[in-house]
Amino acid sequence: MNSFEFDFSGLGIGEESIMKYLGPEEASLNYEFRDLIKELLGKASAVCSPAAEYRIFPAGEWNDEAKTVSPGGVVFRLKDIVYKQLSLAESLAVFLCTAGPEVEKLGRKAMEDGDPMTSYIYDIIGSAIAEATSRMLHAEVRKAAGNSGLKVTNRYSPGYCGWDVSDQHSLFRLMPDNTCGISLNDSALMNPEKSVSGIIGIGREVSFDPYPCRFCRMKQCLYRNTM
Amino acid sequence: MEDILARIARCVESGKTDKASPYPPDMRGSEGADELTLQAINEGLGAARILDEALIPAMAIVGDRFSRKEIYVPQMLMAAKAMNSSMKHLKPFFQSGETRRKGKFIIGTVAGDLHDIGKNLVSMMIEGGGWEMIDLGVDVSPEKFLKAIEANPGAFVGLSALLTTTMENMKKTVAVLKEKHPSVKILVGGAPVTMEYCEKIGADFYSPDPQGAVNYLKQFAV
């Protein structure tokens, strides 16, 4: 059973990890918003429900021309960047992670109440929880692969690095219904929103790149080089 | 003594919502946009004056400072929060028809994309520019935009996309809207969007920051 529930205290999320998304240190924002961040982190940590699950599939056929791979009978159209990083993998860990629905509900309520700043901080906290959860999941996959003498790649998600977000539907076909309470709508968006889906390559010849953002064209991404 | 409209404007610029708000630290304990707006109304200043002489100029300053990277998203959001606290007292006058807005603006993040921070910033700045906002949210289908246009003739439309992969849906949305309503003005924005892309898909305007959209709309204000 490769499913996990994580405690917020083990995710390594503190005030500093939220502040770095607010602006540069010299803007003195850390001082001005520290109390608010602390308060909202406290509320979020009390209600969030981070969970993750993965399943391993033989990679199937790699098609160098079409840049596709076919684990478990579905086809992922990876495009150049993701295909290049994964194509030496012998198997793929397909995963879903979530921060749970609670923090985004707090954020929506704040927005409805006319407080966009509180909503923004909840949004950052929710993203941080989802990302930390996927990092914990990645560590579990790495540990399991290492026990068999195998290595892992970075994790890649539909919607990024040119991989079409519509492949979410294929990814979800490989996981049991309602995994971690996550559902997918017709536009290929997940509910809860603060969820991460993706794949990790496993094999003897694959490698982990510590600087994956250099492949991405989203130069203005809030999370560039911070993960 | 400082004019009350100038005080409201200063509260909005600084993000001072109400007396209880601890932000900004140098205005702790003083009245905010909430109390001052109520006071201005009680003194007989019309909603239109408060909007035109306090909120709109204040939000324009905030937008310009953000464009020049003198302030960041948090300060802009605090300014928007202060604006909201003032606007809640003005809304009854808009709803009764006693005070008119500059026009209507429909905004949404395109289908397949759930990112709303950029869209919300633009929405707040355009509302602060005196426009009535119709926010359709995220993952908005072309059909939903069409319905909103049909329910609000003459409205302008803003489309947001954050993912390179959902820019294609922006293109489809523009095509659908322009086919049915060729005269509708469509503004586009989002991290991967450029002026070149705006022109390529047949949209009318692109700005890399919210204030650019506010400035573009000024020429159409009624």
Image (cartoon, coloured by chain):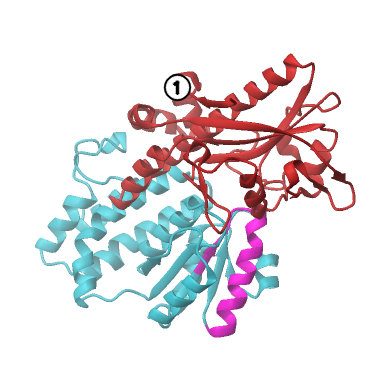
Q: Quadrant of the C terminus of chain B?
A: bottom left
Question: Would residue B10 be found to the left or right of residue A158 on screen?
Answer: left
The residue depicted at 26 percent of the width and 35 percent of the height is: B22
Image colour for chain A is red
Q: Is residue B103 above or below residue B62?
A: below
| Magenta span contains residue B160 | yes
Q: Is residue A198 above or below residue B147?
A: above
Q: Nearer the viewer, residue B66 or B81?
A: B81
Q: What x and y, as percent, mark residue B57?
A: 36, 61
- Occupied quadrant, residue B125: bottom left
Q: Main secondary structure of the magenta part?
A: helix
Q: Nearer the viewer, residue A46 or B82?
A: A46
Q: Amino acid at mark 1?
A: Asp
- Occupied quadrant, residue B25: top left
The stretch of residues the image draws in magenta is: B158-183
Q: What x and y, as percent, mark residue A125?
A: 45, 34
Dot 1 crowding, Cα within 10 Å, few <14, some 14–19, many 20+: few
- Specify whether residue A21 is in view: no
* Chain identifier of the cyan chain: B
Circle 1 residue: A7
Q: Nearer the viewer, residue A200 or A122?
A: A200
The residue depicted at 81 percent of the width and 43 percent of the height is: A83
Q: Pinpoint the chain carrying mark 1.
A: A
